[in-house]
Image (cartoon, helix red, strand yellow):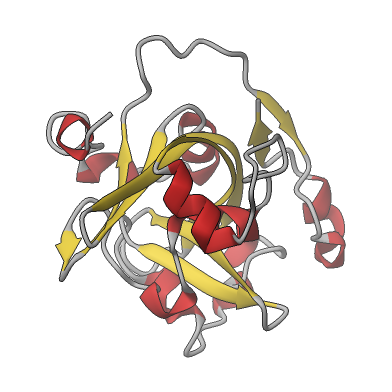
Amino acid sequence: MKSNDIIGENLLDQQFFLGDDVVAIARALIGKRLFTIENGILTGGIITETEAYAGIEDRASHAYNGRKTQRTVTMFEKGGIAYIYLCYGIHSLFNIVTNHENIPDAVLIRGIIPEQGIDKMKKRTGKQKVGKHFTNGPGKVAKALGLHYTLSGIPLNQWVSDFFVGVSRTPESFNQPVNAGKRIGVDYAGQDAELPYRFFL
């Protein structure tokens, strides 16, 4: 599939990202296409796993209790931009900021089924084969798509210099049930760690 087939009518509009129910958005993102274009090279795939983080009231969120730092300030901006942070000083993790300004909701993209630009994704990740573990974690997704933490704050579905990160509609052929469960790696969040805010195929 060429980039022209994705950019245009297929892109999600701004209103999708401005929704006030981050949990519903996290679920709705399952089956959507996430892709990047860098120097004319398209890489992307179908979103298979997400996690919702519900702003200042969610103990698992970086913005819990209104915490605003140099890293998290991006979460307080208007929905439709990328919040990409460095985890353990190694992995960039890609999130989509949702809701309106000063309501720091975000959705972490945890997995995709790779579709476009497989060779480029192999080079980025240093992997020789595309198996079920190729992009089945948030660090793997970001690395395969070239989503580095230095790009945090970049708007979705807009060109910024020679880089584009986009989310497009679910293909008509996609028809799979979506499961829900608790999020991964947020045991520190107490009762909020048990919330069914993770969605996956």
Residue 107 visible within the image? no
Q: How many numbered marks have been drawn onto this rendered protein structure?
A: 0
Provide residue 118's location: percent of width, then percent of height. Answer: 47, 42
Quarter the C terminus occupies: top right
Provide residue 161's location: percent of width, then percent of height. Answer: 15, 71
- Residue occupying image coordinates x 56% and y 52%: 141
Provide residue 31's location: percent of width, then percent of height. Answer: 48, 27
Q: Is residue 111 left or right of residue 164?
A: right
Q: Residue furthest bottom?
A: 70
In the displayed structure, 104 sits above or below 200; it is: below
Residue 129, picture quadrant: top right
Residue 187, picture quadrant: bottom right
Residue 122 visible within the image? yes
- Residue occupying image coordinates x 80% and y 63%: 189
In the displayed structure, 60 sits above or below 119; it is: below
- Residue occupying image coordinates x 85% and y 67%: 188
- Residue occupying image coordinates x 24% and y 42%: 15
Residue 39, picture quadrant: bottom left
Q: Is residue 43 left or right of residue 124?
A: left
Looking at this view, is 42 or 9 the one in front? 42
Looking at this view, is 195 or 145 the one in front? 145
In the displayed structure, 102 sits above or below 134; it is: below
Quarter the N terminus occupies: top left
Provide residue 102's location: percent of width, then percent of height. Answer: 37, 70
Q: Residue furthest front?
A: 128
